[in-house]
Amino acid sequence: MTAIAASIDQVRSRIATAAREAGRDPAEVQLLLAVKRVEAARIREAFDAGATLIGQNRAQELVATEPDLVDVPHETHVIGHLQSNKVNQVMRWANCVQSVDSSKLAERLDRAAAARERDLDVFIQVNTSGEETKSGVPPEQAGELAAVVGSLPHLHLRGLMTIGANSPDPGEVRASYTALAHARDAVVSSADPGTGEARELSMGMSGDLEIAIAAGATMVRVGTGVFGSRNT
Ligand SMILES: *Cc1c(COP(=O)(O)O)cnc(C)c1O
């Protein structure tokens, strides 16, 4: 077994344990591998070990890596801030954009999807920690943006995404994940067209996935826990 395969197994058992402790079915929590700065050959190793879902932060890396992976069935999500001028590049390769944080970006994605005669899954990114360095709409504006996204014919709103508070205090991290769950509940019950299926919560990373799963995560995004620390 490769080191990457062993790490994926470890992360999967952390997910399963956390889900059971929260009284949830482990199958409710998908594992997305955050592959920033991971070369295609190592991503391929992860696929060989059973991974099927990856997330890329930067359009440039996405476009550079995907051509090397076309022969392996997988799903690729954009999980980093997306500039409007990169939308067309991304549309060629991405199955989903999790970082929708403005109606302008949503409208651009909708038009680019229409031009390719396809639909695009999206999440709305919410800044649940209030940290200025983080992208995303404030929780109280998630409903408004969800209504815009829900009205766009080529976008399918799957749920909400957040990056948890960057804090050593588990209580603060938990509060940011609980805030995302509450924002999701409000969106799903809003009765705005196109929002009723937005049940997913993409939250939790290598260091805090247990907290996120306890708060209802349906997808955790793990990088260092599988690929080791990134050279910065
Ligand atoms: C890098 C990254 C992750 C994974 O973080 P790790 O701590 O390496 O597990 C998750 N989400 C986003 C948006 C990221 O950029």
Image: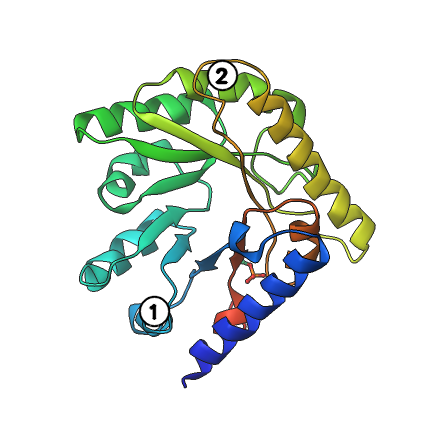
Q: Position of residue 185 (x, y in %)?
A: 63, 27
* Residue 228 left/right relative to 59: right
Tell me the quadrant of ligand 1: bottom right
> Which residue is more in the foreground, 84 or 29?
29
Q: Position of residue 206 (x, y in %)?
A: 60, 63
Task: Residue type at mark 1: give it.
Answer: Glu
Q: Secondary structure at mark 1?
A: loop
| Residue 228 visible | no
* Residue located at (43% from left, 21% from top): 149
Q: How many marks?
A: 2
Task: Residue type at mark 2: give it.
Answer: Ala
Identify residue for label 2.
147
* Residue 141 left/right relative to 82: right
Answer few, some or many: residues within 10 Å of disc 1's Cα (few below 14, many 20 plus, some between 14 and 19): few
* Residue located at (17% from left, 31% from top): 116
Identify residue for label 1.
39
Quarter holding residue 92 = top left
Q: Secondary structure at mark 2?
A: helix
Q: Position of residue 11 (x, y in %)?
A: 56, 68
